[in-house]
Amino acid sequence: MNRKQIWQIVGLLVVIGAIVALFVWFVDLQAVGEVLSTAVPNHLILASTLLILGLLFYALRWQLLLGNKPTLLQTFHASNIGHAGNIIVPARAGEAMRIVVLGQSGVVSYTEATSSFVVERLFEQLMRLLALVTAVAVGAGIELSPGTILGGVAVVVGAFAGIQWLVRQRERVLTRWPGRFARLPRITE
């Protein structure tokens, strides 16, 4: 280990120590202990297992968007750093952290990591919109016809197919689309 790596480890340990100290300072540990003592252990184990499975599928989705270039372990590691960053640092800085971590691995470029992140967010927003529309329709007591359900499924399948096409044709898209977008009229104040 060279001197720079040693200082990085020391700095990391200092930051982790500061975070733990702030946690102990601001969190009422006695109240946390009381809540945990009333929790059902099987429920905690089930919740933890489901959380880890969710994180694995999150990393797997990102790996697939990157064309299976990074390993599942690399995307899982970068995703978890991003989640921790979102919890600790304000303004969702964890999203940038996970892109940087994966970009520094050398397996994919920063551009690939960033573009896959954008595609992933587009897909997530489509899923959120679908969940919102479904919740409003069910909550308002609207009767859903088979045609409405089929149309909703068609929109989701079409969006997924479009994202898959963008991923498979990324070289072509990256060479042609920026020029086309540059010709769009600009909106000024």
Image: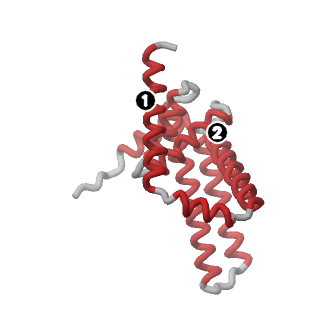
- x then y, percent, for residue 25: 43, 52
- x then y, percent, for residue 159: 61, 56
In the rendered image, the vertical position of residue 35 relative to residue 73, given as above or below: below
- The disc, 2 or 1, on the residue closer to the chain's N-terminal end is 1
Residue 153 or 139: which is nearer the viewer? 139
Crowding at mark 1 (Cα within 10 Å: few <14, some 14-19, many 20+): few
Q: Residue farthest to the front? A: 30
| Residue depicted at x 58% and y 26% | 107
| Residue depicted at x 52% and y 14% | 1
| Residue depicted at x 64% and y 86% | 141
- Name the residue beneath numbered marker 2: 63
- Name the residue beneath numbered marker 1: 11
In the rendered image, the vertical position of residue 137 relative to residue 109, given as above or below: below
Can residue 168 be seen here? The reply is no
Residue 117 or 50: which is nearer the viewer? 50
Q: Alpha-carbon distance for marks 2 and 1?
A: 30 Å
Q: Residue farthest to the left? A: 189
| Residue depicted at x 51% and y 41% | 115
Q: Secondary structure at mark 2?
A: helix
Q: Which label sits in the foreground, 2 or 1? A: 1
Q: Residue farthest to the top? A: 2
